Amino acid sequence: MSLAADDTILGQATRDYPFTKRHCLSVSDFHRVDIENLLRLGEHYLNLEVQKSPDRSVLSGKTLINLFFENSTRTEKSFELAGKRLGADVISMQVASSSIKKGETLLDTAATLNAMNPDLLVIRHSASGAPSLLAQKVECSVINAGDGMHAHPTQALLDALTLRQAFPEGLDGLRIAICGDILHSRVARSDVALFNMLGAEVRLVGPPTLVPLDADMWGAEVFHDMKSGLQGCDVVMMLRLQLERMSGAFVPSKREYFHYYGLDRKKLGFAKPNAFVMHPGPMNRGVEISSEIADDPDVSLITRQVETGVAMRMAILHALAEAQSSSSEQSS
Amino acid sequence: MSVVSIVNARLIDPASGRDEEGGLICEDGLIVEIGNIVPRGEIHDARGLILAPGLIDMRVRTGEPGLENRETLDTASRAAVAGGVTSVVLMPETDPVIDDISLVDYLIRKGTDLPIDIHIAGALTKKLDGKSLTEIGLMREAGAVLFSNGSQPIRDAQTMRRLMSYAANFNALIANRAVEPTLSKGTVAHESNLSSRLGLNAAPAISERIMAERDIALAELTGGRVLIDLISSKAALEAVKTAKAKDLDVYSSVSINHLCLNEVDIGDYRSFAKLNPPLREESDRLALLEGVNQGEIDVIVSDHDPRPAGEKRLPYSEAASGAVGLEILLAAGLSQVAEGYMDLMAFLAAVTCNPADLLGLDTGRLSLEAPANLVLIDPNKPWICASSNLKSRSKNTPFDGRRLTGRAVKTFYKGQEVFSL
């Protein structure tokens, strides 16, 4: 079933609007139709039967390199798993033990990797814009798995896919609050762009020190208190207080932060009844979210986000590989 | 039910602009009737003297907790009522520093037994280190009305920016001293002909202007409310004026000392006139008085800073700076009014309704249902300030031996007489 289904799904989806993107660097690289196609493909891979016995020919003979300059559990492992399930040769570079630690620059690393002729390069870097720099220097597809405080498009896609599962009628008209450390969050930036594209109303909620000055120009309404910010929300997405990206004090104490911005039952009560809670992880329990909420299967989509992660990444790899082969057909 | 009537008074209420003959009735600590009244209950004849709202002093240091040899809340409250002051805002420079909700709560509780209102200025940074934010939100909920780093300014602009935008969320007012720390480091006087002849390390007036301009620019960026604390120079006042013209949430305070004295008062190295900021030139003093008259300076404070003689009777440059002022604020201001330098209504506004509005207090005005915190003022009474008669535990004042005109004759707190001359 898998081969046929695969072909039909992507085939159907891309008949009118072929997926031609070479890279996946930021949400704004894609049109709404691209996004729809990716999400539909993601839904296909969500089926565990399809996922566990997939069509290994999709990426067979392709090489995927994971290049993670920042620590990651979820993202790196889900890309590794997604690549392996689709039949690619997957290499995860151990940055800590590689030449990068010996002082090699990013572009030298790029040249070295390029010489190995990979097909897909997944990169996470602490500097905003590093993946697009790399994309200019290598011949393969580059997938941004998070760059500094700029973008995390695959997380945004998996968040959207998770929401499509929770709200089968779609994101159109949903009110989504993204709360906490907006300033340092690449997830927030990508989510705002994608949710807007899908027709949701996005709100940003956080202390003024952790919300960029011009965030109201991103296409989201800005609030500084949870009560008014969560009013009427269908979804509450909490973000991690990114202590490692903070120089100096942005909030006085964890106690005060939790008091005003930590998600507990009381604050969740400001949102719509039956609102869902999301968190891109890793969580700081008791700082931005109480365990009571995080572990409540009735409201929390947090583990589902991780499940969706593998499927969504399979979809992205699949689409990029498809685009590669169609462009090589064209050129030949 | 306790009823007190004050009759035959000149009622002055800067909040409403009222200045007329009349009386006032207090019931259970609140003002219930003003103007033409039929007196009842306990009756006080004001004999034509001024009846005004009790003063609110927005900048007071005591030694409690930790430095009780300087002043306790009890001695400070006795000094306050003798000077017509019925509300004080305590600075966080105590030992330990007021940087935590438990201390805010402790001091507010302790104040409930006193004949004045005790309000708290919480520290802006932990231990006043100038770096780490304090729990401004929680302290505000616990009752802190103002946030200040004491006599040390927030040196780091990034920290100040975050403080302002964080505090703006709670609509909390931040006070920052207008001192550029590197220009003012180690200085003990105003930079001028006089200080150079005296051989004193001196700070230029623009030190104040630079910091004031920085904080004004940050207020513009963040939308925060900032009080430019203790301006002493024409240069800083100009900066404040420009900010006010732009309609920013920028306010300023001045100490009574800088409205009454100038650098000449340090004379032959009088350490009792050593203040922070330093006394400046006569032209600065006149500009500040004009600033009060024009409403450009919002608040006049005593900058009450009690110091035992041991800290003051030292060579000028080694002596501690600071002066007591709770008992002197009103009298020294009235003296400037009597000499024609200051407008009575503008002066009273700067010590009653203006600080009340800035801090969000219901006191500082003669209005129905407001607390009956009142001061009966004889504006013409001549007297000589003798430091030994002061009720403060510390007696350090540059006004010792000065002739003053006008003072508080009676003070009422919640309708009860708590001081009578």
Image: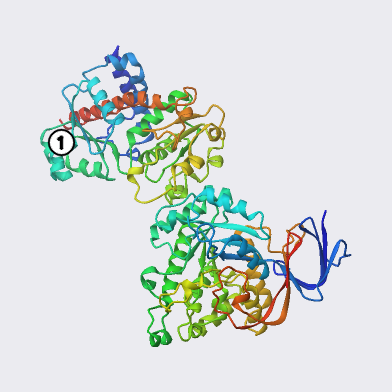
Left or right: B333, with A220 as reference point? right
> Which amino acid does the dot numbered 1 rest on?
Ser
- Number of numbered discs on residues: 1
- Up the image or down, A314 lies above or below B126; here it is above
Nearest the viewer among A186 and A133 is: A186
Display coloring: rainbow
Q: Farthest residue toward the top?
A: A1
Crowding around mark 1 (Cα neighbors within 10 Å: few <14, some 14 to 19, many 20+) is few
- Element at badge 1? helix
- Up the image or down, B415 lies above or below B52; here it is above
Q: Kindly indicate the quadrant of the structure image that contains residue A5.
A: top left
- The C terminus of chain B lies in quadrant: bottom right
Residue B177 location in percent, x, y? 47, 66
Q: Is there any visible trace of residue B276 in the rendered image?
A: no
Nearest the viewer among B123 and B36 is: B123
Left or right: A71, with A256 as reference point? left
Nearest the viewer among B227 and B406 is: B406
| Residue ID for mark 1 | A97
- Up the image or down, B134 lies above or below A131; here it is below
- Could you tell me which residue is drawn at 35 percent across and 24 percent down? A42
Residue B245 location in percent, x, y? 54, 70
Q: Kindly indicate the quadrant of the structure image that contains residue B361.
A: bottom right
* Chain of the residue where label 1 is placed in the rendered structure: A
Left or right: A299, with A76 as reference point? right
Q: Is there any visible trace of residue A243 in the rendered image?
A: yes
- Could you tell me which residue is drawn at 47 percent across and 30 percent down? A277
Residue B85 location in percent, x, y? 66, 67
Residue A316 location in percent, x, y? 29, 28
